[in-house]
Amino acid sequence: MSYLVLARKWRPQGFSDMVGQQHIARVLTNAIESGRIAHCYLFTGVRGVGKTSAARILAKALNCEAGPTPTPCNECARCGEINDGRSIDVYEIDGASNRGIDEVRQIIENVRYQPAAAQFKVYIIDEVHQVTKDAFNALLKTLEEPPPFAKFILATTEVHRLPETILSRCQRFDFRRIGAQDIHGRLRRIAEVEGLNITEGALTLISRAAQGSMRDAQSLLEQVLSFAGPAEEGGAVDEALLRDILGVAERRVLYEISSAVLAGDAAACLRLVAEVADDGVDLAALSRELVEHFRNLLVVRLMEGTAGPGAVAGNDTGSRRLMDLTGEEIALLSDQVGSVDAEALMGYYRFIVQGDEMVARSPYPRFDLEASLVRVATLPRTVNIAGAIEELQRLERKLEGAGEAQVVRASDELPAHPQAAPQPRAAPVRDSEPVGEPPSDREAKPEYVSPEPDPAPPEPDAFVPDVPFSQVETEAETPEPGPAGWSGFLAFVAGEDRLLASYLEQGRLVEISGVGVRLALQGLYRSHVEKKENLAVLEGYLERFFKRKMTVTMDSSASEGKTDAPPRPGEESGADIIDETLRIFGGTVK
């Protein structure tokens, strides 16, 4: 008898044998028990997950001598014929080699005849996406209204290539990738029956390398079995031997590379790539594993952020839904991720994915993998957003304090404005006192009350103050109710746009009239306010506050205005605060 490969020898023979597809097995079982058997089924999923095996099991369940039954006996003549592929009523058709309209016409012609021996005539069309458009169109009517004894089972790995008219005539079942734990259990059973002495770590490595395909896992195990021989002929196959056989990287390398990346050690990344390249490891496969590894690091970090440190390793159910790993590996990931910020891990993952795309299509995969890891390892350290926001809030408080300090200094050094609110007669204003005289000298002089009446205020259009913004007040055209004057306008702007208000407070108001204002600003503040969009916003605020259209112009003699005095101890100038903000976010002013 010829040798039968493991993938065929261990093909599932019943719905209960299907690994990782319990949801599909349950639906098909209930459909057969209730008699609700559809005339056309569509099985879709990646390679090696059991689509064709499920189609054969369904054909046996329908044609078993004890059936239709959800548990075919696999002992009767009909089950035996289907298992051996020699049943004259069950047709397994390759869609790639029978894709034309002539082959489909032959199916349409034969489907009209009664089955020869079985109860149902079953057509299993594998890789059905290879069928041409004209052939699909010819098959539409038959799929929609086949004879009651005819059943169609279509299988494909690329369901998106099927026409919508075909999809609407089928019951669709999506086969999932098989989990590494499920593959590990099946491989352990096969190894025991086949007499292969292999360690659990080696089985885990094969299960992960199969990437959800049971057929791929069984093929890898068969390769190991051919190399090692029966258990009595030698020692156990461990991970080191398995790497030599299959040319795959061990998990240790992934953790070492990720540790070097997180530590910013680009030289260590180059050394590790050189080691695995010398061992003959497939670098494209290593790059794909790194993508998954950094994704797992990110998942562990996010889960710790919601469940608390140390809670991930113990949450086997929740963690295994997101990561197909053992509890020990999840604990290792948790230890490695430490206090790395989730946003930083997201950046690492994004660059690793971009590097994997380059490695996959590059004629020099080693060089591109090295360049990708060096790029990731040398990324600038990111700043925690919450901490940056707190720092900005602290700077904003300092900025407000600096503005208040400027108001106090200006009020000590400047005379009362002629348009300020009149003082009560009980405390008359001493207009004859010289400006800037020390308070002690003013107190030593006798009080003098001017017998002259208060001078009439000048016309609004002739008002030309030369004082800081925060000290100018005017009662002309202010909204009611609300604060009056320019200081009220500054408070209004601060409520709408704090950054623009802080820029205005760094300059001076040169002139205000019924038609506009003239400002004196310097350097960064002037360049910001002079921008077209910012001037439009400022003029809009003026119109809203003063209830009239007003324009904004810049004073050409701004350099003669406010002098940049050194800040007092404990204070920070506006420019210092802006520089500190740029330092936090690593930005520049354009």
Image (tube, rainbow, N blue to C red):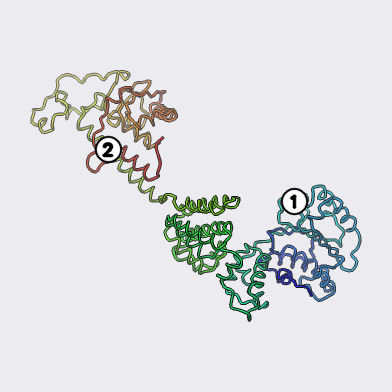
Mark 1–mark 2 distance (CA, rounded to whole Å) = 71 Å
**What is the x, y in percent for residue 150?**
85, 61
**What is the x, y in percent for residue 295?**
53, 57
Q: Quadrant of residue 401?
A: top left
Residue at image x 51%, y 53%? Answer: 370
Work out whether mark 1 precedes mark 2 in sequence or the reverse, and give the earlier one.
1
Crowdedness of circle 1 by 10 Å Cα count: few (<14), some, many (20+)?
some
| Residue type marked 2 | Glu
Q: Marks 1 and 2: which is nearer the front?
A: 1
The quarter of the picture where the N terminus appears is: bottom right
Q: Which element type, helix, strand or loop, lies under badge 2?
A: helix
Q: Quadrant of residue 230?
A: bottom right
**Of residues 12 and 120, the one drawn nearer to the viewer in this rendering:** 12
Residue 499 shown left or right of residue 224 in the figure = left
| Residue type marked 1 | Leu
Q: Which element type, helix, strand or loop, lies under badge 1?
A: loop
Label 1: which residue? 162
In the image, is residue 353 above or below residue 216? above
Label 2: which residue? 404
Q: Find residue 232 and name its label.
A: none
Residue at image x 22%, y 34%? Answer: 409
